[in-house]
Image (cartoon, rainbow, N blue to C red):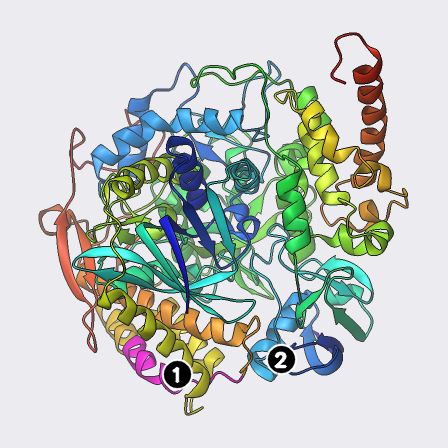
Amino acid sequence: MRTRQIELQVMRYDPEQDQEPRFQNYSVSCQEDWAILDALNYVKENIDTTLSYRWSCHMMVCGSCGMMINGEPSLTCKTFIRDLPDTVRVEPLANFPIERDLVVVLDDVMEKLQRAQLYIIRKDDPPAATTEYEQSPAALQKFKQYTMCINCMACYAACPQYALDKDFIGPAVLALAHRYNLDSRDQGRAQRLDILADHDGAWNCSFVGACSEVCPKHVDPAAAIQQMKIDGTLQWLKQKLLPGGKA
Amino acid sequence: MEHVKTDIAIVGAGGAGLRAAIAIAQANPQLQVALISKVYPMRSHTCAAEGGAAGVKRADDSLEMHFNDTVSGGDWLCDQDVVEYFVQQAPLELVQLEHWGCPWSRDADGSVAVRPFGGMKKERTWFAADKSGFHILHTLFQTSLQYPSIQRFDEFFCLDLLHENGRCTGVAAMEMRSGRFFHFEASAVILATGGAGRIFPFTTNGAIKTGDGMAMAYRAGVPLKDMEFVQYHPTGLPGTGILLTEGCRGEGGILVNRHGYRYLQDYGMGPETPIGKPVFKTMELGPRDRLSQAFWHEQKKGNTVATAWGDCVLMDMRHLGEKRINERLPLVRELSTSYVGVDPVKDPVPVRPVAHYMMGGIDTNIDGETPLSGLYAIGETACGSLNGANRLGSNSLTELLVFGKRAALKASGYAAGQRKLPPGGDSQQQAHSAVARVRALLQGGKGTENLAGVRREMMSNLEEGAGIYRDEAGLQATCTAIAGLQQRFAGIEVHDKSNVFNTDLQQALELKNMLDVAETVSASALARQESRGAHQRLDFPARDDENFLRHSLASQRPGGAPEIGWLDVTITRSPPGVRNYSGNREP
């Protein structure tokens, strides 16, 4: 198979050694069918065993290997040598603290995933243990795309609002909350509203849409957030203005 | 060393670990659960499962049929009481997931859709397009977030089990972020660490699947059962080993050799069925072991297609049409297009068998209990003998749920009934030994050996000697080679000295785990002098019920080859018979 020499410029940072991040260059002879992840694995096995990064599935679904590739938030297993120039800059995901080399600290988004109540909430009892909910293919289609989020956090790295304000709940978590709001089995929309429609929630989005552009799974968080703003307004009006609405 | 006291420590936060954690939190919110994983839960390899989860659903199906398919699929090495419980509980667990929000694909009437799968007599595989495992994992993870009694320890690498007086007392671990060591003190420990496909060079398994739980149990004196049974999935993408789901064939995809001939009919799986109209338990819907073995023969005969990544056969899905492929197999289309440059809508996709799943694992009974009191195991890391000598596709996702829950409830009862004892000398000593082992790697190491080199040799030896077909000479050579690599491991130097997210160190610890697992695979395969399911011996080509209708048990013997013992198979109502995948004539 044909190979091509690629110059990888990889950001390195060990908090025990380095005052600040630095770049290290590795020259790698890459097969033309490789993804950037294969080149990193080549470095790790053959050139420099100290390079640290996360990866597992190598099939675009575990969400571990999100990094900046030539400035774009990307999955390294889904970014192919054939689509890249001879020099490739690999950096940890933007907008997150660096833990070590290409590994970022994810505490903030993990806390937000926890906070957003991303599970089915019921007021009524669910059906019997032997009986499924009825859900038409059309009802499934309403929220299906938002279930595709793999939590790679590329959207946070792309989000200009999250860059400015770390309190912003952010695209992936809002899209997932919207997924449950739209699910015909869920009755928790009002309960999620307090978290999602306040100033750290959907209203904080400046609608640049970068999140949707970089999503490797073609989820459209920007659309979810816009819909939530409308939902939030309607819900708020209903609660405030209708008799018997929750004040 | 930091101390964490908890009631139940669960190691591994994939499908099985999460299901267990939720079961405990629901059954007894007073019990503290420490959910410990070397990765964030969403990264667990459950996410890579594609095709679906089996459970009887249709009116024309029955528990009896699911039972029979599973037992014959497993070549009668399944414990039948376990299979009976499994098929009963399967539909309940799949409905439970539906209640938790799993986005199962639906029929037009709004009920959950089911698809055909290999070795199954009816459509009973519940699916969410071709990302079933991903959706199951995320549904479980998100559902688990509502239970305050579940405390997660993400990116903690477990080193060894702690035990004293025949009772498991906890686990020693290292926090990846800081390099700090933790002593988890627990009344019960549940291992849910997944399989060990990474001992092979060509595998569908993600980087994290290094057999950590199996190795920890083995080192703690718990036997590993039926380790010789390694499942090769017949349709992996060449080069990367990425899985193309059995759902491709369930939906009607066919396999052809380089002459365009549907070769499966030559290997007891005929007669040929009409294209696009798959027939249960025949041809492309035969079981995985038979399909992978057929490839081996086709390769010997020169009937495979030479590609840049080695010999392949072709999976043709063109007749399904773009609409159905997009609807039912979108990931398959994306993976084929991205990684081998073939769009299944337009061209047949090259595929070849790839190491996929360990039928064997930590010896457990139907309750997930291991011989070590207080230690439980679930999911791929366990061998509760549901799958016997060959697992049917889509039984394992359901297995995570059914036995994840059952073992969790058993462990809850056990933990609630245990008087909490302060850790005694043995546990402390073991925790310190585990730490010493890590420090030795970091500080010592003569540097005479290279980590990646030893790992490559392990992989190639296993593929060479313990692949789809095996024989005495090859297995003997593999056993000897693995023993040699165990010695050479001492010479490995970890170059990275940092305490922070040290993946060089982690890979060294994982390699040790894989070597431990690898020695049980090759030794068990050498001891089983018959051919059954996924274990095929060229020198013993027949199944031998008289001598080997038994589970193998590999126990560690420090400094030597594992000791192999045997355990009877539980047979309740299906005496060993003939596996028939020819024309669906089987009852």
Instruction: State the mark number for residue B440.
Output: 1
Give me the residue at 36% from left, 30% from top: B583
Cα–Cα gap, marks 1 and 2: 20 Å
- Compared with B180, B168 (above or below) is above
Query: The residue under label 1 is which amino acid type?
Result: Ala
Give the residues drawn in magenta, as a range: B481-495
Label 1: how many Cα within 10 Å (few below 14, some 14–19, many 20+):
some
| Residue at mark 2: chain | A
Q: Name the residue tied to disc 2.
A: A16
Using residue A100 as the reference point, say whether residue B32 is left or right of it: left
Q: What kind of secondary structure does the magenta stretch mostly adopt?
A: helix
Give me the residue at 41% from left, 45% from top: B33
Quadrant of res A82: bottom right
Label 1 or label 2, whichever lies nearer to me, is 2
Q: Is residue B187 visible?
A: yes
Residue B450 drawn at (x, y percent): 46, 84
Is B443 covered by the magenta stretch? Answer: no
- Compared with B313, B432 (above or below) is below
Residue B337 drawn at (x, y percent): 69, 51
Q: Is residue B540 visible?
A: no
Give me the residue at 54% from left, 24% from top: B113
